[in-house]
Image (spheres, rainbow, N blue to C red):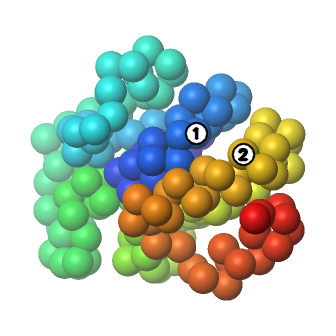
């Protein structure tokens, strides 16, 4: 199971791969805080396609307050995605660099969209050409990925 943060959902939406991701057979969960941030994405449709909403209790929101004190650079939604991944022992999917750094200290397994694209291509759920197009769409819409990883994937997939 994966806990997904806002940045990943938005990048997948911009890349035009939401349907492919949700049909992958993997299970996805997001906190109520993350889902509330998804203004350009049809959240009821995500939920109808199997995404689980994890509503945090009052006590859990209190735990987020402590995390917010420890990690001032992260939003409540980011912290909630981290919290869900940590408590439920899920893998966190995020494209937020600051959040990825925090996962190391919290011992939460973490991956991002580039990892996801590689996995989808490797499992033949996307062609390399589809992955190239999705990556291009995401980057044209402002996604920021490590340049060296993007270059490596483009060579491997023989992107134009």
Residue placed most toward the observer, 156 or 28: 156
- Name the spot of residue 99 as percent of width and height, x first: 39, 71
Q: Which of marks 1 and 2 is in front?
A: 2
- Residue lying furthest bottom in this view? 148
Q: Which of marks 1 and 2 is nearer the N terminus?
A: 1
Residue placed most toward the observer, 48 or 106: 48
Is there any visible trace of residue 83 in the rendered image? no
State the residue at coordinates (82%, 73%): 155
State the residue at coordinates (77%, 50%): 129
Task: Look at the picture and state if 104 lies above or below 83.
Answer: below
Residue 102 appears left or right of 50: left
Q: Do the residues labelled 1 and 2 touch (CB within 8 Å)?
A: yes
The circle on residue 17 is 1
The circle on residue 159 is none
Mark 2, Cα crowd under 10 Å, few <14 / some 14-19 / many 20+, is some
Regarding mark 2 in the picture, which secondary structure is present there? helix
Residue placed most toward the observer, 106 or 143: 143
Q: Name the residue under label 2.
A: 130
Regarding mark 1 in the picture, which secondary structure is present there? loop
C-alpha separation, residue under disc 1 versus residue under disc 2: 9 Å
Task: Look at the picture and state if 136 lies above or below 50.
Answer: below
Q: In which quarter of the image is residue 43?
A: top left
State the residue at coordinates (70%, 51%): 131
Q: Quadrant of the C terminus?
A: bottom right
- Name the spot of residue 62 as percent of width and height, x first: 14, 54
């Amino acid at each position: 199971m994966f806990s997904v943060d806002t940045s990943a959902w938005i990048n997948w939406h911009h890349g035009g791969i939401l349907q492919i991701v949700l049909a992958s057979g993997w299970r996805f969960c997001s906190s109520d805080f993350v889902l509330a941030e998804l203004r350009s994405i049809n959240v009821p449709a995500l939920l109808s396609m199997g995404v689980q909403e994890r509503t945090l209790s009052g006590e859990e929101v209190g735990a987020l307050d402590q995390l917010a004190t420890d990690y001032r650079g992260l939003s409540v939604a980011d912290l909630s995605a981290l919290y869900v991944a940590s408590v439920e022992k899920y893998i966190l999917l995020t494209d937020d660099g600051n959040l990825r750094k925090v996962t190391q200290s919290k011992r939460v397994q973490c991956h991002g969209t580039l990892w996801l694209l590689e996995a989808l291509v490797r499992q033949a759920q996307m062609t390399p050409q589809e992955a190239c197009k999705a990556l291009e769409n995401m980057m044209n819409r402002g996604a920021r990925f490590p340049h060296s990883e993007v270059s490596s994937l483009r060579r491997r997939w023989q992107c134009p």
